[in-house]
Amino acid sequence: MGRYIIRRLLGMIPLLFGVSVVVFALIRLIPGDPVVIMIGAEQATPEEVARLRGLLGLDQGVYVQYVRFLGRLLSGDLGTSIASQEPVSRLILERLPATIELTLAAVGVALAIAIPVGVVSAVRRYTAVDAAGTVAALIGISMPNFWLGVMLIFLFSVRLGWLPASGRGEPAVAGLAALLTAGNPATLGLAVTHLILPAVTLGSALAAVITRLTRSSMLEVIGQDYIRTARAKGLRGTRIVIRHALRNALIPVVTIIGLEFGTLLGGAVITETIFAWPGIGRLAIRSIIQRDFPVVQGVVLMIAIVRICASLAVDVAYAAIDPRIRYA
Amino acid sequence: MSRWLVLALAVAVVMTAPSPAVPAPAPAGTLRIGMEAQPTTMDPGLSTDLYSHQVYSHILEGLLILDPQGVPRPALAESWTPSADGSTWTFRLKPNVKFHDGSDFTADDVKYTIDRILNPETRSPQRGGLAQITSVEAVDRSTVRITTRAAFAPILTNLAINAYILPRAAHTRLGRDFARRPVGTGPFKMVEWVPEERIILEANPDYHGGRPSLDRLFFRFVPEASVRLAELESGGLDLIAGVPAQDIRRLRVSLLVDLQEVVGTNYRLMGFNTANKPYDDVRVRRAIAHAIDKSKIIDVVWPGRGVVAEGPIPPTSWAFDERFKGLGYNLQRARQLLAEAGHASGFEMNLLLSEAEEQRREVALFIDQLKQINITVKPTVVDFPTLLDRLLKTNYDVLRVGWTTNPEPDSLLYSPFHSSAIGGFNFTKLRNARVDELLDRGRTVANQAERVRIYREAQRIIVDEAPMVFIFHEKRTYAHRKAVAGFQPHVSGWIPIKTPYGLDVRVGPGR
């Protein structure tokens, strides 16, 4: 297992190299000058623009800029933001935890809804419960999450006043820490109330996908011989469903979570904008608008790393769920 | 099981950010402000963006400050006098002013701040506004002499905008950290900045303009306009900048919220590349200007958010000419001009515009209105940085763009219309000797009444030359809960709270 993980980690290097080339080229292929945007239209004289371009090294050839970028990258330096003159790594690390928190919460929401609904739909196939689950899943898949987000805000914040409309409040981990060390639940409450709406918004599409997947996967497993054997042994229905069927039905679900994790990170860009969530998505949007090349490169690389790590984590999780799977 | 424990711990480590104290739910004396975006930096030398300014302008101050109408007023300077030739200004500094760290504010800090911006190594985007300065001299502790290349009247406005005064000692000590932990002389002090989430400032009890009525300012960054308004209406925020267009009419009669509007110092325009045919012919340009029904564009696309532009100078500018009428809607005149230019049967017009939703809706009206004079509009939609790039390379025939500046008429007119700016922001390539002469004179004359006459004449010639169709001036909108008192909208989109010229926003009971 250890050797397998190391091999996979080494395999990331050429992949990330490819990502760096693509993002470096793409952001420079689209027109737009970061210096003009930074100075602001009314003050940008051609001399001023040329001077700043020279100081920032933007007047050099793209190859030269790339080699410099790569050289810095190898020593762990993502460069400096053109807009704020702050280190890119700092800008990213300050925001990444919020994005990961939101994404994990979205996965949590999706699983909490989807697995019970999927299981019940499978066990009670072709009943009203199953039909309702199917309709709900279709709605979940079809609904754009920017629309869902705004509707949830309107209902739960403006009309009912139950939940805050935007912002993060506090990090959930800080809330957990306050609860465990000082026995103070206020921070965690603040964190959770802020987290609910964006997590539901981001997780709804995934919940729909997982519901359908759990249902079909369960149906397949329930028809297997060993389930019939278990029934023949006289085990109780719920025990069969949960211990024997669900555990095996979950393998494709884990796969899809791994694959969808990257999609969720992408979706987080929109959800973060709607809910003013202080994550990496807003940094990405702003830096693209400002043509802040170093920040865009850093964000894309970081998302690529997170995505690759997620797929690795999924492969490792297979082994935990299915004892037959072993990596050498 | 231990595998999961390790995973959980790893996640916990990743997610543990430094956790600040939980903000209390809006105590009396706290004003919660919703901004459109997060500031880039609190170091005013490093950024010209509006959002940074909306926050650091409460912490730091310039020698002068622009009031809500854009007129320079005293801030850290008590008074100023120009030399006879207008090229040297002597500023008397306000005595007994202290920075938040307790150190004295002196002429030395002024010199340090401006020299730093002018130093190319600083890479300051503020340099353009101060580039005319040749020397800054600390005559004594409370006197500063600033010399410009030639007489340069806009320097007062530019000093107010581009030169927020840094404490030399603290700035040198903090270095790059100053951008997160600014120290100034302003009415509020920095308390906390959680990236993308909030900035908290607290009142400076020793402020030289008197202690602010508010105890705390709490800034949140909510990019989505409808969500910003939802926060305001559900009580999560007290004041927001930038109100969603579709809600403006409703808010005008709201019982909960006051809408505040002001025409900004800007113009929204359709510009012609006067080097390309047929736009090199002034008759064609005038014809198009006469064919566009500006009021209809405002009514359909920008209801309640704009006023018709007669020329580039907006009604909130001190150079505004209330008697001046530009090229109004007149189809007959438009057809006649086109016929004279030999284009009675019309032509195809390539129109470049940005992807902003309103601009795309305007296109339908342009197509319809210009069809009346047989011109077929072919729109191309690009993102804003691309538009700016093609504008600067004059790689277009006709484009739709906006020009937003500080309230100084020099900024409204010089770079878009002076021939020396061709290759820069004179993107229509207008070349008119009289306009050049007037815009140069406007920089050197110190007499305000004389400057008003100069800019009004320049506007008349520019509108007549019609390098652009001036469509409308856009309003800046703010909304706040009724309990907020004393707020005034600012032509530049700033959020003035407590100022040396007497503004002092309060939050009453019953929020």
Image: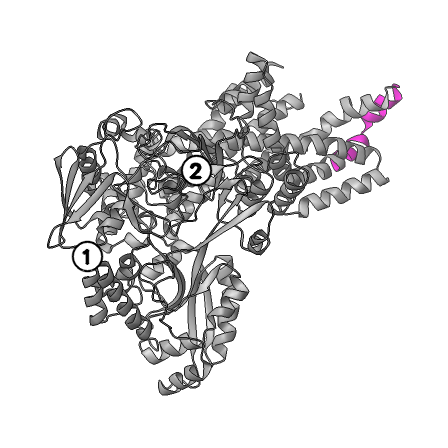
Q: Is residue A229 magenta?
A: yes
Identify which residue, B29 or B54, lies in the foreground. B29
Residue depicted at x 60% and y 35%:
A164
Left or right: B27 as drawn, with respect to B395: right
Place of residue A314 in the rendered image (x, y in percent of width and height, measured from the top left): 59, 29
Q: Which residue is mark 1?
A: B446
Disc nearest the viewer among 2 and 1: 1
Identify which residue, B508 or B286, lies in the foreground. B508
Magenta stretch: helix, strand or loop mostly: helix
What stretch of residues is rendered in magenta?
A216-234
Looking at numbered disc 1 in the image, what kind of residue is underneath it?
Ala
Disc 2: CA contacts within 10 A as few (<14), some (14-19) or many (>=20): many
Residue depicted at x 35% and y 64%:
B312
Q: Secondary structure at mark 1?
A: loop
Picture disc at residue A159? none
Place of residue B30 in the rendered image (x, y in percent of width and height, measured from the top left): 48, 32
Q: Is residue A159 magenta?
A: no
Q: Can residue A245 be seen?
A: yes
Q: Is residue A265 above or below residue A75?
A: below
Q: Is residue A52 above or below residue B361?
A: above
Using the image, name the chain to which the residue with label 2 belongs: A
Looking at numbered disc 2 in the image, what kind of residue is underneath it?
Val
Q: Secondary structure at mark 2?
A: helix
Q: Is residue B299 above or below residue B345?
A: above
Picture disc at residue A299? 2
